[in-house]
Image (tube, helix red, strand yellow):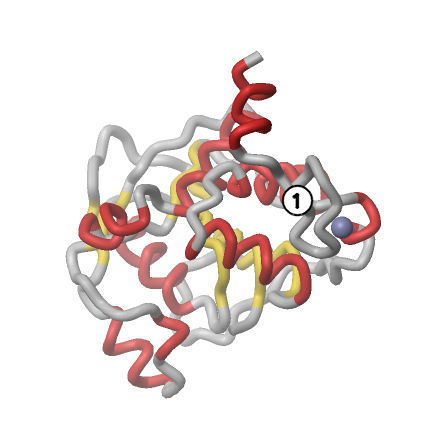
Amino acid sequence: MLNFILDLIFPKFCVGCNKFDTHLCQKCFEKINFYPFPLQPEINACALEKIILMAEYGGVIKKLITALKYQSVRDIGQTLARMIYYTTNFPRTNVITSVPLHKKRKRQRGFNQATEIAIELSNLTNIPFIQLLKRTKYSKPQAQITDKTQRLSHLENTFTINQSLSQYQSVLIIDDVTTTGTTLNECAKVLKQNGHQKIYGLAVAHGN
Ligand SMILES: [Zn+2]
């Protein structure tokens, strides 16, 4: 009933073709370029086992992520998590976490888009979600920095451990978009330094 009421107040339209009553219709879903294989990141001394990518960052995927991040259409996080769940082969880890936002940016946006996706993925898989990391440095989005070495130094000491209840055998870190995997790897480094074993990255989309 509540969903019904919310739908009337906030009607949904397909981001691809404006079809009523859905964020993404079947026809537009079928046009997505899904990635069949995980990516071996090209990072020296990579702390990640692998990076799983759902799809290319373009078309309706880009539109969904833009609506989630910049128009704050919060329940698109659920749509994206369901897409990951049904189309992507990812490891069933002990715990799911997300790339954290700085609290200032979280306040601006109202929520962390990666956490929205991670929590829904946690609901679908019954793997617990724990916010293991926090972002201590407020900085401009990684996508706005084109130079690779700058990207790296820009991220140094950005993340710290948020809570260390236990040390897990395997952790899956969720992000919305990744280009080189640098951010996911910085998160993985901190987790490994704090005793977590195998760290996997999962991004909804690959590209800028
Ligand atoms: Zn459509």
Q: Is residue 146 above or below residue 135?
A: below
Residue drawn at x 72%, y 40% is 20
Q: Nearer the viewer, residue 147 or 90?
A: 147
Q: Is residue 173 visible?
A: no
Q: Is residue 152 above or below residue 76?
A: below
Q: Position of residue 166 (x, y in %)?
A: 27, 30
Residue drawn at x 21%, y 46% is 161
Q: Position of residue 178 (x, y in %)?
A: 49, 65
Q: Quadrant of the N terminus?
A: top right
User: Left of 182 or right of it: where is 63?
Assistant: right
Q: Nearer the viewer, residue 60 or 178?
A: 60
Residue drawn at x 33%, y 56% is 187
Q: Is residue 161 above or below residue 17?
A: above
Q: Position of residue 121 (x, y in %)?
A: 54, 34
Residue wearing tag 1 = 13
How many discs appear? 1
**Looking at numbered disc 1 in the image, what kind of residue is underneath it?**
Phe
User: Left of 89 or right of it: where is 172?
Assistant: left
User: Left of 35 or right of it: where is 128?
Assistant: left
Residue drawn at x 27%, y 48% is 106
**Which of the 4 image quarters holds residue 128?**
top left
Q: Is residue 77 visible?
A: yes
**Which of the 4 image quarters holds residue 195?**
top left
